[in-house]
Image (spheres, grey):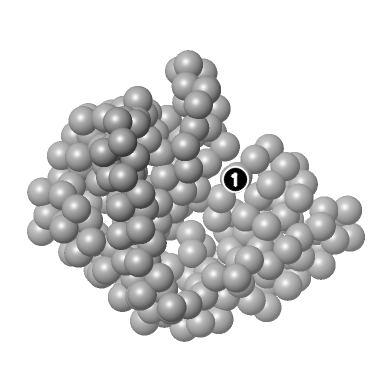
């Protein structure tokens, strides 16, 4: 269950099922957004790909990730993004900002030994951290070996413009019609940070104030 090749399709199925239940109850989204893997579920609800195609994409994504060495860590740091980014910069070959969950909550991902050094530096600067229980260092340079294979795999699928307004957490903005219809987007989605806080801000500024997770 804790192996990402199983976790990812399970989460995707659960999230789509929950969305379907709410919609059968008459609760339909005015907009959607997803965090990391959850972006596949959001895209599925928005009609970017079919449920079955989404499952194929997620399953291959998880399978490829499972082939990577389990030598990473994933930590969340309490501190200003600029300060965390300055600490990470020294280790940019093996460590990256993996997500911005709030103005003072930043996820850092990468090679375990270098993450430990980043954590030590953050601690000295008064920024506490907590390790997250994930199996691989997602959204970090350690994902680079699978980017091209996954982009090639995505090329076999028909990807559509979203029918429901969808905020991309790659950009933090509402997706344009062609944003996710190219395989290169889903390559970026593995590697770039999850701009969750920016996405939430975009939704709020568009007048959305009732959120269902």
Q: Nearer the viewer, residue 111 or 30?
A: 30
Residue at position x 42%, y 45% from top?
34
User: Where does residue 119 sit, x and y in percent of width and height?
Assistant: 76, 65
The residue tagged 1 is 100
Q: Is residue 25 left or right of residue 171?
A: left
User: Where does residue 118 sit, x and y in percent of width and height?
Assistant: 73, 65
Q: Is residue 134 visible?
A: yes
Q: Nearer the viewer, residue 80 or 197?
A: 197
Q: Is residue 19 left or right of residue 111?
A: left
Q: Is residue 180 visible?
A: no
Quadrant that contains the N terminus: bottom left
User: Where does residue 38 sit, x and y in percent of width and height?
Assistant: 40, 51
**Above or below 60: residue 41:** above
**Above or below 212: residue 136:** below
Residue at position x 20%, y 64% from top?
56
Q: Is residue 93 left or right of residue 173?
A: right
User: Where does residue 178 sit, x and y in percent of width and height?
Assistant: 21, 34
Q: Nearer the viewer, residue 184 or 39?
A: 39
Residue at position x 87%, y 54% from top?
125
Q: Residues within 10 Å of mark 1 (few under 14, many from 20)?
A: many
Q: Nearer the viewer, residue 52 or 28?
A: 28
Residue at position x 30%, y 60% from top?
13
Q: Is residue 175 left or right of residue 134?
A: left
**Above or below 203: residue 162:** below
User: Element at badge 1?
Assistant: strand
């Amino acid at each position: 269950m804790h192996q990402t090749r199983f976790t990812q399709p399970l989460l995707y199925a659960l999230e789509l099922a929950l969305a379907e239940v709410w919609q059968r109850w008459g609760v339909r989204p005015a907009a959607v957004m997803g965090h990391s893997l959850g972006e596949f579920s959001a895209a599925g609800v928005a009609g970017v790909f079919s449920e079955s195609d989404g499952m194929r994409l997620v399953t291959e994504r998880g399978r490829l990730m499972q082939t990577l060495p389990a030598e990473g860590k994933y930590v969340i740091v309490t501190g200003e993004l600029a300060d965390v980014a300055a600490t990470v910069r020294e280790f940019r070959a093996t460590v990256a900002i993996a997500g911005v969950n709030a103005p003072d909550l930043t996820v850092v991902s990468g090679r375990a030994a270098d993450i430990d050094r980043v954590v030590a530096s953050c601690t000295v600067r008064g920024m506490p951290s907590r390790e997250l229980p994930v199996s691989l260092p997602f959204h970090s340079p350690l994902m680079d070996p699978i980017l091209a294979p996954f982009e090639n795999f995505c090329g076999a699928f028909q990807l559509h413009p979203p029918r429901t307004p969808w905020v991309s957490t790659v950009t933090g903005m509402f997706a344009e019609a062609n944003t996710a219809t190219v395989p290169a987007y889903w390559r970026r989605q593995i590697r770039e940070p999850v701009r969750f806080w920016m996405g939430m801000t975009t939704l709020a500024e568009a007048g959305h104030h009732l959120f269902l997770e």
